[in-house]
Amino acid sequence: MQAAHELRQKGRRPARVVRVAAGLLAALFLAAARAQPVPVTAQATDLTSSAELMISYRHQEHMWQTPDGALHLLANRGTTRPNPGLVLFSSYDGGVTWVAKLALSRTNRNSTADGQLEGTTLSVVYGDADDGVVFAQMAYDSVTGVWTLNRTESVYRAGAMTARNPTLAWDDSGVAWCSFAGVYTANDDIELRWFQRPTEGTWVDTGTVVGPTDNRSKERSARPIRIPGGMGLIYRVNKTTYWTSRPNDAAPGVLADPRVIHVGTARAARSDPYASHFGVVADDGGHLQLAIADDGAAMYLRYSTLDDTWTAPRQINGADALSYLQIGLSNGQVQISLSASRGSGAVYLSNDYGDTFTQAFALRLPPASDGVSYKTGRVETATRSRGPLAVMQQYEDQKVQRLMVYSVPVP
C-alpha cells in the first residue's frame, strides 16, 4: 500500500509542476497587463442640481466614508426642489443612488462647504445666504442611517465683508480653525481671514490676515490641516502656493512667516478663478500629500512633519491636460484622481508615500450624447476610503448639473 501511495504521489508531481509553471506564466501576463491602466467606465447617479457649484470648491472636502462603508456627500442643489441649497446625502451602494438626509438652512446656490469626519461625527463650515460663515456638527447612526444635527454656530456674520469658500480643521488639542476669503463691500478688497474656536467656546477672529489685501486678484483660497503639535495652513494667491504653520501653545493669531512651495505657470489657458484647484491629505507615515492643478499639469508635493520640509514640485500626469483633480487615501495608498472632462481621466496610485506614482486606472467618458457636456467636470472622492474608490464627476445634461460615479477597484 505504501509503495502504491508513493507511486501515485510521484505520478502527480509532473502535473503539479505544470500547474505551478502555468500559474507563474499567468502572473507574468497579469503583471504585464497591469503596466497598462485598467479602463473604468462611469455610471449615472440620481443626484441633480441647478448650480454649477454642486461639489465646489476643489480645496474643500465634500465626501466622506463612515466606518460602516456608507458614503456621504454634501452637495449644493441650487434651487432644485425638494431640498434646495446645501444638502447632506448618503449612499449605500458605492455612490450610485443617494438619499437626502439633512438640509442646511439658509443656504443658496452660491453656498460652498468643507467638512471633517471623525468616526461618525461630521463637522462642517459653510457659507450661508447672508454671506456669513456657519459651523455645524452632526452625528451619524450606522444602525438607522440617520444623521442628527447637534449644533450650529456663527463663525462670521457678514457686515462690512462678504465671506466665501470657508475651510475647517481641528488641531490635536481640540481647537477648531477656519479660514475663508473675505471681500470688503466698500472697495472690493479681498483677503484671507483666520478664525478659531476653543474646545468649548465661541468662534473668535484672531485678527490675523493671511497674505495680501488688495483688489487686483480674486484668486485666493486657504486650507488648514492638522500637524503634530500644531496647525498647518496651505494657501494660494493667484498661481503661487504658500505654507505656514503654528504650534498649539502659541497665541491664536500667530502664524510663521510663509514659505513659497510652488509657483504656477504664467499662462491661464485653464481657469482657476479662486485659486482653489488643489487638495491635501495627511497620511499615516508623517507626511502631508499635496496635489495642485497647474494649467493642465497635476503637480505633486510632499511635506515631512518630522523635519518640516517640502519636496520640490513634480508633475505626475502625462501630456494630457487635466481640468480638475482630487487627492486622498484609498485602501492605504495615496490616490490622485483626474477628471475625465478633457478626456484625461485617470487614477494614479502610490504605495510608497508618494515616492512614485503609477497610472493604475483610466477613467473613460461615456459615449457622446446630444445635450450632454463635460465642461463642468469637477471631481470628488472621499479623503479616506476603503473598498472600491468612488470617483464622482460632475457633468451637464440638458442644462441640468448631474453626477456620475466611477467605481475604481483600487487594490
Image: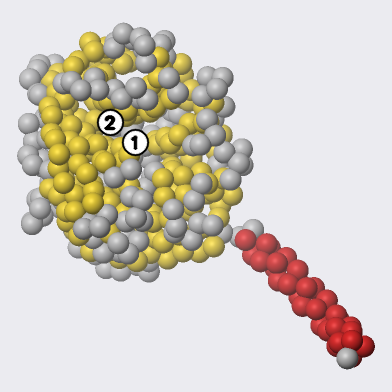
- As drawn, is 149 to the left or to the right of 117? left
Where in the figure is residue 252, as x and y percent of width and height?
Answer: 29, 12
Does residue 292 appear anywhere in the picture? Answer: no
Q: Is residue 389 above or below residue 135?
A: below
Mark nearest the camera among 2 and 1 is 2
Instruction: Please tell me how many numbered marks the rendered image carries.
Output: 2
Question: Pointer 2: what residue?
Answer: 167
Where in the figure is residue 162, as x and y percent of width and height?
Answer: 13, 25
- As drawn, is 73 to the left or to the right of 311? left
Image quarter hosting the N terminus: bottom right
Image quarter hosting the C terminus: bottom right
Residue drawn at (17%, 56%), measured in percent from left and top? 100
Q: Is residue 59 above or below residue 72?
A: above
Q: Nearer the viewer, residue 288 or 269?
A: 288
Label 2 element class: strand
Which of the marked residues, 2 or 1, is nearer the chain's N terminus? 1
